[in-house]
Each structure stands twice: as C-alpha cells, then as structure tokens.
C-alpha cells in the first residue's frame, strides 16, 4: 500500500498547471481549457484509481486492524513535541478519499466545458488540483497539525476560487469573508491543539482518543473542535459566508461548497468521535446547533430567488442534518449522509451550472421556467437529485436522511423536540427544492425572447458527469456506507418504519404544496422579506463585528497611538531638551549633536572604566 | 533551565571572518568607482552570505582573544545554535538591502554601500559577543549606518523620525549601560576581578539576592523592548519604517528587531532568570498586547509601509511570547519564528519596493488592480502574504504554532488572546493584497504604462527566499535541531 500517489498526483497537476499559467503570462499565449483541464482531470482520475486500489487493499485487512500508517517525513520536533507528516488510511478516511477523488474527477471533467471561454483556465485548474491535494491531506492526516495543514489549505483554495474573477470587488469580498470566517473557527482548532498537547502530550488522533481526560477538559476540547467545524462547515454562528461563496464558478460551488470542503467538519467530528461522545454537553450543543442551522437555513432557502443561493442554503441545512447525527452520538450516519449528499448536491449544482451556462449567466429562478424540453439531460438528472434530497425511496437520500431522523428520536441523546425540528426542516427541504425544480423546469417560461432562442443543452463533457452523478444519486444509498453494513438494517424497528413513512409522506405533501403554489408562475415575483435577507444575520455581523473592529482599530490609532504613545515620546523629547538646556550642552538640537554626545558619553564611561579610574569609585 | 553549550569546548575557531569580511568590504567600497558600487555591493554581499553559510555549517564554536588583560578582560565570541541563525540572516538581509535599486545608488552610493557593510559588521559583532562591553559597543554602532541612511536618503519628515528613533533607542541603551556596569561592579565586589563575560555575570546573578537585580533587569528589559519593539515602547517604529529608505527599513524590520530578540535570549534570560520568573505575568501580557494592539493598528492603516511596520510589531509579539514562556521549547520556537519573520518581512518590503518602483500611489483605500499587469510579482506577493498570516506549509506557521503550544501551558489566557491576532493578521494582510492586486486596472498614465513585470534576477531571488520559507515550513528541523536536547 502506498498512499503518497493519492496526494502527489493532484499536487503534480497543480504544479504543472501553475507553471503553464505563469509561462502564459510571460508569452501571453492562452493555455487551452482542454490541455490544462485534461492534465488536471487525468491527475484526479489516477488519484481516484489509487483511492479505489487502496480501499480494496484496506478491505482485505481483518476488520479490527483496518488501519494503515505511512510516514512521509518527520515534520517538527521540539522539547517533547514531535509531529510527523503521516498519512493514515482507515475506513473513515478511505470513504472520504473515494468521495473527494471520485466526485472531484467528475467536476474537473465538467469544468473543461464550463470554463472553456475563461481567460486563464490553467490557473483555474491549478487551484482546483490544489484544493484536492489539500482536501486529501485533511482526511489522510494522522495528527491534528497535519489535518490543520489541509484544513487551512482548502480554505485557501476556496478563497482563491471564490474570488476567481477578481476584477469584481464584490467577489473578492466574498472570498475574503469566507477565509476570515473560517479563520475565526480555526482559533477553536488551534486552541484544541494546545489543550491536546498540554493534557495528552501528543497530537496524534489515536493517542488523543486513547487518553482519558478529566470531564471539563473533554467538554472544552470537544466544543473547541466543534467551533472550528462551525466555521468550515458553515453552521450557526459562522454560516453566513457560504451563500456569498456562490460568487465563485459553479463547478467550484459543487466541489468545494457542497460535496467536500464543507463536510470536513463532519469528518473532524467523526475522527475525534471518542472525545466528542465522552461529553454529553458537547453532544447536546452539537445537536442543538445542527438542528437550528438545519431549520433556519431551510426557511431562508424558501425565500431565495438566486438558484445558487437556494442550493447554498440547502447545503447549510443539510450540513445541519449531518451535525445532528453527530450530536446524537451517531457520527457514522452523518458520514453516510456526507456521501449521498456529495452525490446529489454536486449533481444539483452542476445541473444549476448547466442551466446558468445555457441562459448566459442568468441565476434568478423567476427568470427561468420551462426548461424541461430544452435541457432534457439536465432536467432528468436534476430530478434524480431532487428525489434524493427529498428522501424518496429508493433514492440515496432516503437511506441516509431517514437514518438521521430516526436516530434523532431513538438515540439515547435524541429527544422529541429535536426530532420535531428535524421533521420540520425536512418538510421545508421538500418545499424549497420542489419550488426550485418547478420554477426552473416545469412552470411556463419567463425568459426573454433573445435568451430563449439560444438555449441549448450543454456539451457531453458537461452532461456526462451529470449522468454519472445522477446514477450515483439513485443507487448511492443502496449499499449503505462501505464501512458499516450493520447500521441501516438495525434502525428499522417498528417506530423506525413509522418515521420513514411519515417523513416520505411529509415530503410528498410539501412537494405538492410547492407545485400548486409555483406551477403556474408566469411573472417575476418580488420577494422582500426578512427571510430573503437571511434574517439580517449577515448585516448584523458586518455592523457589529466588522465595523466594531474597524472602529476599535481607528480609536486605537487616533486616541491611544496619537494621544498617549506619541505624546509620551514628545514629553521625553521635551525632558531631554530641558535637561539639555539646563546643562547648556545640547542647544544645537540636531540629531548629530545628540549622536556626538552619546559617543562622547560612551567613550568617557568606557575610558573611566577600562583604564582603571573606576577602581577607586564606588557604585 | 536553559542550558547553552559551553563554548570553550567547541571546535570552530574562525569566527573572526564574520566580522573581518564585512569590515574589509566596507573599507574597500571607498576605492570602488561610483558606477560600479551596486555590482560591487551585490557581489560582496553574495560572497559574504555564502561565506557565512559555509562557516556556520562548519559547526559551532567559541573564540577568546586577549584584550586589556591587565584588567582580566577578554574579547569573547561565540557561535551557538541561537546566534548562528542571526549571523546567517545578517548576510541574507545585507544582500537584499544592497540589491534594491533606488536613490541611494544615485546620491552618494559609496556611503550607502559602506554603511551597509558596516552594519553587517556591527550586527555580527553584537550577535557573536559573549562580552557585554563589546556587545554594547556593537549594539550602539548599529545606529550609525541607520542614521546615515535615514538622514541622507529618507523622506521629507526624516529629521523628526531619526530623532524619535534615536532618542528612544538611546534611552534604552543608557539604561542598559548603567545596568551593565552595575553587574560588573557586583562581580568585582564578589571576586575582586573585573569581567564582563556573560558566563561570569550569570554566576554572579545566581549568588545574589534577586531583589538587588530588579532595577538592572528593567534596564536591560527596556533597552531590548524598545529595540524589538514591544508595545508600549514602539512609538518610534512607524515613523522610522515609513520615512527610511527601503534598505534601512529592511534592515530594521529584518534584523535590527532581532537584535532585541537576541538580547533577551542571550542576556536577559540567563542573567535575570529569577526576575523573569517573578515578572512572568507582566511579560506575557505585554507580548500579547503587542500582538493585538499592533494588529489593530495595522487594520486601520492606509499606507502599505505603515501596515507592514505594524504587522512586524504584531509578529514580534509572538516571538516574545515564545521567549517569555521561559521554556527551552518556547525559546527554540521563538528563534524559528524570528527566522520566519525575517524571511517574510524582507520579502514583503522588497516586493513593496518593486511595486512602488512601478507605481507611485499605493494607498490602501481603493482597488488598484495591479495583479493582471504584474502576474509574477503578485504570485510572489501572495505567497509572502500567506507566510505572513502563518498558513501551514510555511515556516511561519510552524514557528507560531510551536510558540503558542509552549506558551499555552504557561499562560492560557494570553495564548488564546494572541491567537486572535491570527484572525486580525488575516484581515489586514488580505486587505493589503486585495487592494493592490485586485479590482479592475485603472487607466494607465505616463511612465506607469511601460512598467514591466519583474525580471529573471528578481524572480530568482524571490524563488530562493520563498523556497526557503516553504522548505523550512516542512523541514524546520534544520533550525530546531539545536534546541531539541
């Protein structure tokens, strides 16, 4: 087993495309999307092959010992702290590797078509490969600093890709917001590492899991880790960056802001589940935050008009579902939902990209409609994604989502209120998704004449990934997670069966209501309510924290720095001047004179000391 | 707790090259014609840097020369695992400083080149001295070239800034000088002999009641705290960094600040160990305040150089946090972070110089859209920004992470507060980058429109520096090895 190929291939892809791009800036010859995209896609496909190969090798190991460590090089070692750059493959990281490289390859392929007209596709594909490299480091790292390396690296790639069209200050601002909010969460990660080092003495995940800590420290550690996850996985309170992140190219939204990076919070909780589950407080906080996020962002999604924003809030909501799974002590259900969600949400984003591409960058769902006939492949694959997120049997979402719903009631950490909030969120999910589907594909066309004529289905390079993901969205849940066959069947008690039926019925009712409400929409709707603005949470953050920091900084600059510090210096100057005048020596007032004085003083003192005068003087 | 190798047993005895070579280069520069000064300076600096690296690779060492032996005073020099990195950095920073083009090569270039090499000489003498007196002389001598540089090639408000800088440092130095003589006096009153050797003074400090050293401790503390600088002793930094010519700014931020850091490691901790423990709470608080206060000042700054100077203070706060953790791990991490900070800040100031060569106005209140016009420059700039915000993969991350890890067990609150500096750092550095690089390019005017991207030689230097940042980010053992015992 050799894991280095898995991460090195995207790294090489990044380096090659990076050099190609930099060379193109010198000789101003554009590198074609086919060439750079081809390199990037091949790198990802080979990496996927490596992930598959390693997955099967891992399966052959006995069930208890499915773990493989590969030390690449020692990283840093100082006074008792020793961290190596070690890749660790176990069932958890193996599943994530498959998702990242598998879905990643498809999105790379799709991007060749989507970024065909871009000015510098080589740069785009370099960033995309860099992202995959970092993401693989995140899931394969055996120590907290190694995961943090990937954690920050994906944040960086996300920043670069959100602000990819950087001539637009708004997009740049969106990237900045994402990066800064992620970094706020990172404080949690950093302090968690300091605590782990102080109390465990090691930053290796296995060591941390095997070292019992006192209850307060366990809770603190768990909550800090979870705080880091709220940044990366866009949960309350740090979720407002994700809708803005839609400023990036649509395949980026599919890969980074739906399928992979935003799920790294779930990964981290799963990786540290022993610590998380050792504290009931941590668990209930996670469940509460997850449920609130799932519900609130579902409400907001119902009021959005931008196709990508609807999907973005939907992603936030679905991530909330996954966190609820972690919060009721059933991390593995969360991971299962990560996988199915990666299929259907990537599918829907790519479908949305296909629509946007066909409509020349139109993103308002009220300016679409009737695209079922014009974009048949996009439509039918989108329907598969829609059915999956609604949780209709036998689509993939049915298996993973119902498992979470059932566990939120039946697990020892679950409760009735939690369950009811989740059911409400599921209801809203069905409503806004049907609304989206109906407005874009089924309702009468509201496009302008010029746009309508030029609409055409996307090329094969874009529809092929849609079809593959469509199939995955159907069958993706049938076999459960490849790492825990036992759980799905186990859940189906009699009340479990009832919950399943109830949730499917609820979804169908919601879908019907949405169809009735939006099926005949003929004119552009003006929604102007507080939900559309995300309950003004973002505006609040901006005015409170953003401007707050700015004001404090300005206050410091004007008041403390100018009035106190600089005045202190002026006083010192005055005192020196005064004493100088008194001594009638420093009347010159120029720096040279002071310099001269200083040297004279030094030499006098030195002479006094060195040549023995000092012997007779007492200090 | 902190054991440094006893130098006298170490092998490398050719330490005088670190001082003789730059001094010779300084004197020789007066013989070189004006037009060749830059070529001479670059060649000399490369030679000096390469020689420094070679000598350092030959192993650690110590050297004692007789000097005024009738008073029992010797010249002592020592190359240990702390000073060797500062010596190498001196060579590197000297090279970058003389490489930059500017009015210092048009107006009296001889003085500039001579000053630069004299600075290297004085810095190395300070970093290698084990004798407080030679250290002090070298420490003060560093001012001379800086004052020349700011005085001759600085901007209009230079007189005020020179004076501020000079006055603050001078106050600190005087305090240190008095404290130094007090220590020597204590040694004399105990043993009947004079010595300014650090080892002798450490022994004295161990055998004396801690209260008697408090004032001396504050004398040293103040001198180095001004030099680093720590808040609230930073009043001189902004004016000095902004008004100095770029090479002087690079010297100040890259290596002069490290003279303060070095002073804490070499003198304050060994001699005033008990006092450091006694005032530990204040020390870490000052470091944490430096981090946050300077970062906030950087956020509200609209002038790129001012922003970088505040950013420098903020990062040096992390370095001091590591030193004030009073653990060997913290000190090792602080040395690593010092190297990291020098590399990153030198690259940033250098890139800023390249940019201001190409465009006069770089005010950070609107988007300038320069990235598409100078792609190579901005790729390098971006990597330097990432190093400055301590992204993993750069040596700055390892340094900062280790510093915080070792200071957390000692002072959890200050560590967590300092970590907030990481967020603030991201805000101001990214704002800095985005305002310059992003947005739509403005209509070009006059000379600006013909400005080209950086050339091959510039690119090679940047690849070297940034490569070092990334290489050390994955192999920090190169530096940490000396501290793992």
Image (tube, coloured by chain):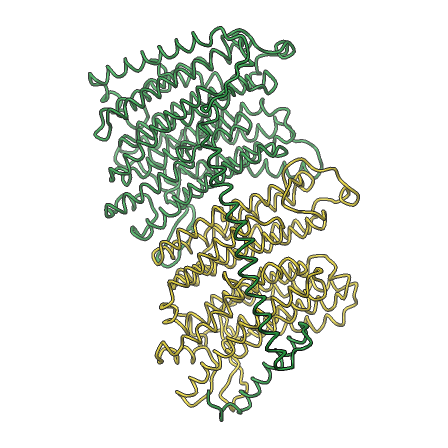
Report the side of A288 relative to B91 (left or right): left
Above or below for A32 versus A511: below
- Rendered hue of chain A is green
Q: Is residue A394 visible?
A: no
The residue lying at 36 percent from left, 18 percent from top is: A396
Report the side of B34 relative to B250 (left or right): right
Which quadrant would the N terminus of chain B be assigned to in this image?
A: bottom left
Count of all numbered marks drawn on residues in the image = 0
Which quadrant would the C terminus of chain B be assigned to in this image?
A: bottom left
Q: Position of residue A59 (x, y in %)?
A: 32, 30
Query: Viewer-proximal residue, A123 or B409?
Result: B409
Q: Position of residue A505 (x, y in %)?
A: 31, 11
The residue lying at 37 percent from left, 26 percent from top is: A294
User: Furthest-bottom residue in view?
Assistant: A616
Above or below for B432 versus B14: above
Q: Residue A333 appears in which quarter of the rendering?
A: top left
Q: Position of residue A598 (x, y in %)?
A: 61, 78
Query: Viewer-proximal residue, A479 or A607?
Result: A607
Query: Viewer-proximal residue, B389 or B290?
Result: B290
Q: Position of residue A312 (x, y in %)?
A: 46, 25
Q: Residue A502 appears in which quarter of the rendering?
A: top left
The residue lying at 41 percent from left, 18 percent from top is: A473
Above or below for B266 versus A163: below
Q: Is residue A292 visible?
A: yes
Q: Residue B415 appears in which quarter of the rendering?
A: bottom left
- Rendered hue of chain B is yellow
């Amino acid at each position: 087993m050799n894991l280095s190929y898995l991460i090195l291939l995207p790294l090489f892809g990044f380096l090659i495309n990076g050099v190609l791009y930099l060379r193109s800036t010198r000789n101003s010859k554009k590198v074609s999307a086919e060439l750079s995209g081809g390199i990037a896609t091949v790198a990802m496909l080979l990496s996927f092959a490596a992930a598959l190969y390693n997955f099967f090798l891992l399966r052959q190991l006995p069930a208890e010992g499915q773990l493989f460590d590969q030390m690449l090089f020692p990283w840093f070692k100082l006074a008792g702290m020793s961290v190596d750059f070690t890749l660790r493959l176990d069932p958890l990281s193996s599943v994530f590797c498959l998702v990242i490289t598998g879905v990643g390859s498809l999105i790379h392929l799709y991007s060749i078509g989507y970024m065909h007209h871009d000015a510098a596709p080589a740069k785009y594909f370099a960033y995309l490969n860099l992202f995959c490299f970092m993401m693989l480091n995140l899931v394969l790292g055996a120590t907290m600093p190694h995961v943090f390396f990937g954690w920050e690296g994906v944040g960086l790639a996300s920043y670069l890709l959100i602000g990819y069209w950087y001539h637009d200050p708004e997009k740049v601002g969106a990237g900045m917001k994402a990066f800064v909010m992620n970094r706020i969460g990172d404080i949690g990660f950093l302090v968690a590492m300091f605590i782990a080092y102080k109390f465990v003495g090691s930053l290796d995940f296995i060591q941390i899991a095997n070292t019992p800590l006192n209850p307060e420290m366990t809770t603190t550690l768990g909550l800090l880790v979870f705080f880091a996850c709220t940044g990366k996985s866009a949960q309350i309170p740090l979720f407002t960056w994700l809708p803005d992140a839609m400023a990036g190219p649509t395949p980026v939204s599919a890969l980074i802001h739906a399928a992979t990076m935003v799920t790294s919070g779930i990964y981290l909780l799963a990786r540290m589940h022993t610590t998380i589950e050792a504290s009931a407080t941590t668990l209930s906080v996670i469940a509460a935050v997850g449920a609130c996020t799932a519900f609130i962002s579902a409400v907001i999604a119902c009021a959005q008009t931008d196709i990508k924003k609807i999907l973005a809030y939907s992603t936030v909501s679905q991530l909330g579902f996954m966190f609820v799974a972690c919060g009721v002590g059933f991390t593995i259900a969360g991971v299962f939902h990560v996988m199915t969600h990666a299929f259907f949400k990537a599918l829907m984003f790519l479908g949305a990209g296909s629509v946007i591409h066909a409509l020349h960058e139109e993103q308002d769902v009220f300016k679409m409609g009737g695209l079922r006939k014009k974009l048949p492949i996009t439509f039918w694959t989108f329907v598969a994604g829609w059915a999956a997120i609604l949780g209709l049997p036998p689509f993939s979402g049915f298996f993973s989502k119902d498992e979470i719903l059932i566990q939120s009631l039946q697990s020892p950490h679950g409760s009735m209120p939690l369950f009811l909030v989740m059911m409400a969120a599921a209801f809203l999910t069905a409503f806004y998704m049907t609304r989206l589907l109906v407005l874009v594909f089924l309702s009468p066309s509201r496009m302008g004449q010029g746009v309508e004529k030029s609409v055409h289905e996307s090329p094969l390079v874009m529809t092929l990934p849609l079809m593959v993901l469509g199939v995955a969205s159907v069958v993706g849940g049938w076999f459960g997670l490849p790492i825990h066959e036992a759980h799905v069947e186990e859940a189906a008690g009699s009340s479990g069966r009832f919950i399943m039926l109830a949730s499917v019925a609820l979804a169908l009712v919601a879908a019907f209501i949405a169809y009735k409400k939006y099926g005949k929409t003929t004119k552009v709707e003006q929604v102007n309510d507080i939900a559309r603005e995300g309950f003004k949470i973002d505006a609040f953050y901006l005015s409170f924290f953003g401007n707050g920091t700015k004001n404090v900084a300005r206050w410091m600059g004007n008041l403390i720095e100018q009035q106190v510090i600089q005045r202190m210096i002026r006083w010192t100057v005055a005192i020196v001047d005064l004493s100088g005048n008194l001594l009638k020596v420093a009347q010159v007032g120029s720096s040279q004179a002071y310099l001269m004085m200083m040297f004279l003083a030094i030499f006098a003192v030195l002479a006094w000391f060195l040549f023995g005068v000092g012997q007779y003087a007492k200090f | 707790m902190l054991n440094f190798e006893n130098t006298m047993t170490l092998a490398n005895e050719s330490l005088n090259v670190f001082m003789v070579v730059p001094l010779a280069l300084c004197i020789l520069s007066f013989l070189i014609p004006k037009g060749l000064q830059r070529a001479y300076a670059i060649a000399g600096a490369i030679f000096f840097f390469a020689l420094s690296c070679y000598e350092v690779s030959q192993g650690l060492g110590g050297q004692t020369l007789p000097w005024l032996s009738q008073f029992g005073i010797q010249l002592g020099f020592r190359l240990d695992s702390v000073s060797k990195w500062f010596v190498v950095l001196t060579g590197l920073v000297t090279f970058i400083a003389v490489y930059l083009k500017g009015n210092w090569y048009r107006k009296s270039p001889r003085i500039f080149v001579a000053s630069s090499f004299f600075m290297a000489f004085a810095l190395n003498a300070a970093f290698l001295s084990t004798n407080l007196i030679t250290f002090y002389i070298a420490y003060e001598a560093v001012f001379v070239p800086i004052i020349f540089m700011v005085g001759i090639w600085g901007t209009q408000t230079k007189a005020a800034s020179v004076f501020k800088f000079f006055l603050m440092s001078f106050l600190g130095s005087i305090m240190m000088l008095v404290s130094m003589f007090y220590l020597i006096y204590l040694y004399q009153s105990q043993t009947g002999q004079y010595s300014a050797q650090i080892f002798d003074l450490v022994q004295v400090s161990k055998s004396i009641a801690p209260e008697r050293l408090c004032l001396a401790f504050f004398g040293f503390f103040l001198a180095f705290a001004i030099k680093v600088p720590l808040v609230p002793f930073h009043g001189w930094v902004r004016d000095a960094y902004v008004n100095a010519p770029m090479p002087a700014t690079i010297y100040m931020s890259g290596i002069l600040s490290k003279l303060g850091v070095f002073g804490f490691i070499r003198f304050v901790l060994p001699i005033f160990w008990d006092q450091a423990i006694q005032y530990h709470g204040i020390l870490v608080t000052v470091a944490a305040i430096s981090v946050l206060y300077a970062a906030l000042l950087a956020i509200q700054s609209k002038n790129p150089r001012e922003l970088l100077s505040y950013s420098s203070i903020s990062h040096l706060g992390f370095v001091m946090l590591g030193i004030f953790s009073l653990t060997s791990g913290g000190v090792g991490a602080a040395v690593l972070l010092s190297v990291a900070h020098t590399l990153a800040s030198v690259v940033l100031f250098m890139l800023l110089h390249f940019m201001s060569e190409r465009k006069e106005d770089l005010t950070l209140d609107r988007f300038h859209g320069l990235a598409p016009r100078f792609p190579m420059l901005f790729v390098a700039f971006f990597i330097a920004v990432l190093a400055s915000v301590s992204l993993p993969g750069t040596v700055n991350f390892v340094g900062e992470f280790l510093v915080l890890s070792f200071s957390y067990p000692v002072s959890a609150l200050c560590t967590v507060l300092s970590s907030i500096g990481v967020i603030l750092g991201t805000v101001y550095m990214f704002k800095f980058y985005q305002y310059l690089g992003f947005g739509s390019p403005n209509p070009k005017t006059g000379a600006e429109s013909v400005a080209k991207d950086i050339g091959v030689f510039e690119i090679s230097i940047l690849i070297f520096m940034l490569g070092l940042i990334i290489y050390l980010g994955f192999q920090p053992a190169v530096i940490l090895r000396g501290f793992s015992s």
